[in-house]
Image (cartoon, rainbow, N blue to C red):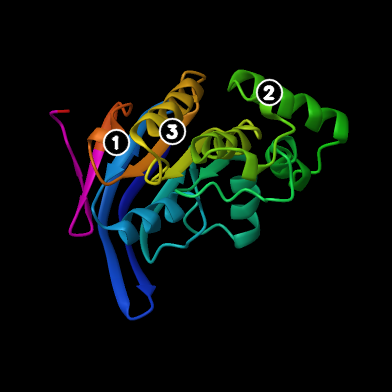
């Protein structure tokens, strides 16, 4: 599903430079994996590479048996919007839109008709126990519920992969547990889940852990 071979990446962030090097890992279809690191920039940079948002300097990246390393930006975007859902540490919902409308947005970008969009959104909201909140606005929801809406938005396109960058970093212990349960629920449908975290405890639902140390990925074979 996802294979990185000898990837190297120089990431320039203002006056700072964060380097990812010798990245080698393989993630199977339907796995729930976590990348653990204290370095926020490294983790975010890695997900941007997997999510086809950032080109790599060296190495090879394969997604779903497709070598995406040298694809054009247009082809990468086409692959990304149909196969990859994103969740961030902040929900990034649009305040002026209802829960239903926020979740519907990716389907508009895919140019699906209104009837199909309604069916997709209501199905996802029902699966994630959010249907009763479809007419709420973000300001009426707690951070926990907002993040669950963000997960629904990522899931509504029926992606093969969901990438979640520190999805529970801003939540209480209880709220974080509920959000992780939603991701685990989606994973049960053979959607590959890749999250980043700063601790093993926050990645308790992951089946496999990768540790990023000094810019390199280390597989914990004893987990």
Q: In the rendered structure, are the residues bearing label 2 and label 3 in contact, judged by CB atoms less than 8 Å apart? A: no
Is 221 magenta? The answer is: yes
Q: Residues within 10 Å of mark 2 (few under 14, many from 20)?
A: some
Residue located 24% across and 50% down the image: 37
| For discs 2 and 3, the disc positioned in front in the rendered view | 2
Looking at the image, is 12 positioned above or below residue 109? below
Q: Position of residue 140 (x, y in %)?
A: 64, 39
Quadrant of the rendered image containing residue 138: top right
The residue labelled by disc 3 is: 193
Q: Secondary structure at mark 1?
A: helix
Q: Residues within 10 Å of mark 1 (few under 14, many from 20)?
A: many
Q: Position of residue 89 (x, y in %)?
A: 44, 48
On screen, residue 209 versus residue 106, left or right, reads: left
The residue labelled by disc 2 is: 131
First in sequence: mark 1 or mark 3?
Answer: 3
The residue labelled by disc 1 is: 202
First in sequence: mark 2 or mark 3?
Answer: 2
């Amino acid at each position: 599903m996802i294979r990185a071979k000898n990837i190297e990446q120089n990431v320039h962030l203002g006056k700072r430079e964060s380097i990812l090097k010798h990245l080698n890992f393989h993630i199977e279809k339907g796995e729930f994996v976590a990348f653990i690191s204290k370095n926020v920039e490294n983790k975010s940079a890695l997900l941007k590479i997997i999510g086809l948002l950032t080109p790599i300097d060296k190495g090879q990246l394969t997604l779903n048996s497709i070598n995406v390393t040298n694809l054009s930006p247009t082809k990468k975007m086409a692959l990304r919007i149909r196969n990859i859902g994103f969740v961030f540490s902040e929900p990034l919902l649009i305040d002026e839109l209802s829960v239903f409308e926020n979740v519907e947005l990716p389907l508009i970008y895919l140019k699906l008709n209104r009837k199909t969009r309604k069916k997709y959104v209501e199905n996802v909201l029902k699966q994630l126990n959010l249907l009763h909140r479809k007419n709420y606005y973000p300001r009426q929801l707690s951070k926990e519920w907002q993040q669950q809406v963000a997960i629904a938005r990522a899931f509504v396109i029926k992606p093969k992969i969901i990438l979640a960058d520190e999805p529970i970093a801003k939540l209480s212990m209880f709220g974080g547990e509920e959000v992780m349960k939603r991701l685990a629920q989606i994973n049960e449908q053979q959607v590959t889940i890749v999250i980043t975290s700063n601790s093993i405890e926050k990645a308790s639902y992951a089946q496999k852990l990768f540790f990023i140390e000094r810019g390199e990925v280390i597989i914990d074979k004893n987990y």
